[in-house]
Amino acid sequence: MNDHKLIFVGSPGVGKTTAIRSVSDHPPVSTEVPSTDETRDTTVALDFGELTLADDDVLRLYGVPGQERFEFIWPLIADGAMGMVVLVDNSLPGALETLDGYLRSFDDFIGRVPAVVAVTRLRDGVGPALSDYVAHLARRNLDLPVVAMDPRERDDVLYLVNMIVAMIDVPVAA
Amino acid sequence: MQAASARQAPLEMFFPDEASRVACAGAIRRMMESVPGSYAAALATIDGKPVIHVAPSDWRHARVAAIVGSLCALGETLGKEVNQRACRNVLIETESGLTVVQRLPSPAERLILLTTSNREANLGVLLTYSRTCAAAIARLAARPG
């Protein structure tokens, strides 16, 4: 049995905690607290879940807090990860610029391990299209898969996870 | 040493008037004066924003506040994970000092107090004065709407 580590990064509220909760075999470890400037809760340390893959391999799923003030913890959580999911909320203004910020912060990491861009809240006529993301990444010489995802949907998250797992050539999740 | 508000929004949210801010800083200073070896203290929100600090000038208050928020959440989460209830504080003991992180009691449970000391401090004394200070600040703080 092997274990593999996958990290989820992205803006606060984009769906990292929800995505991990959607596929984790057990109730995930969560460090959500009430936000002082918004009505929803926000992750302040990490999320952690586990997903059993084929051959009893285990995928350890880590979510990082999205706000820049928690940047100190990003490399601590990312250390040893074999892949990364960058989530982008397409309903917010400046989605492409937000994506750029996370790509810059994890620049070294993205060059070493497989990464996928997962676009949430994708609606026709609102925000960039998936093709805009692909073109945007291409202009930065980044060849990353871009997929639409609803983090509440287990199948959506499994599709994404399996894509990354396939990129690193380990058994896929059921 | 300096007492400073790091960002106005959280400070004004929890201490809307000048009198309560002065009293809060006073409570922190009194605690530090009562604990031999105490060299810094800070108040942060549970989501990692700086509120107020009494600390050396090189103190990176925004970064400290974010770490305090993460640490408190991890301490409370670990406590639950190992079947313990009601985390009182997270204690860090190093070769050069002690650090205590604790969430304030109601109605200020969205605030966290960090206290630090060198090895001169006695752990029991530090914990006792930290808790007393936390309770005093909690009485001063407004509950955000």
Image (spheres, grey):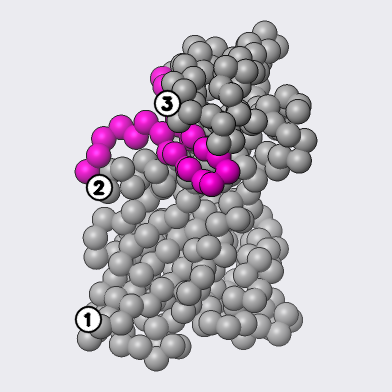
Position of residue A4 in the picture relative to residue A115 (left or right): left
Tell me how far mark 1 sits from mark 3, CA to CA: 48 Å
Q: Which quadrant does the N terminus of chain A fall into?
A: bottom left
Q: Residue B124 carries which label?
A: 3
Tell me how far mark 3 sits from mark 2, CA to CA: 24 Å
Q: Is residue B25 above or below residue A43?
A: above
Disc 2 is placed on an element classified as: loop
**The stretch drawn in magenta includes residue B96:** yes
3 and 2 marks in contact (CB < 8 Å): no
Query: Type of residue at label 2?
Result: Val
In this view, the residue in front, B6 or A148, is B6
Observer able to see residue B24: no
Q: Which quadrant does the C terminus of chain A fall into?
A: bottom left
Quarter of the figure with residue A3: bottom left
Disc 3 is placed on an element classified as: helix
In this view, which residue lies farthest toward the front? B120
**In front: label 1 or label 3:** 3
Quarter of the figure with residue B141: top right
Q: What residue did someone put label 1 on?
A: A56
Q: What residue did someone put label 2 on?
A: B82
Q: Do labels 3 and 2 share a chain?
A: yes
Chain containing the residue with disc 1 = A
In this view, the residue in front, A134 or B69, is B69
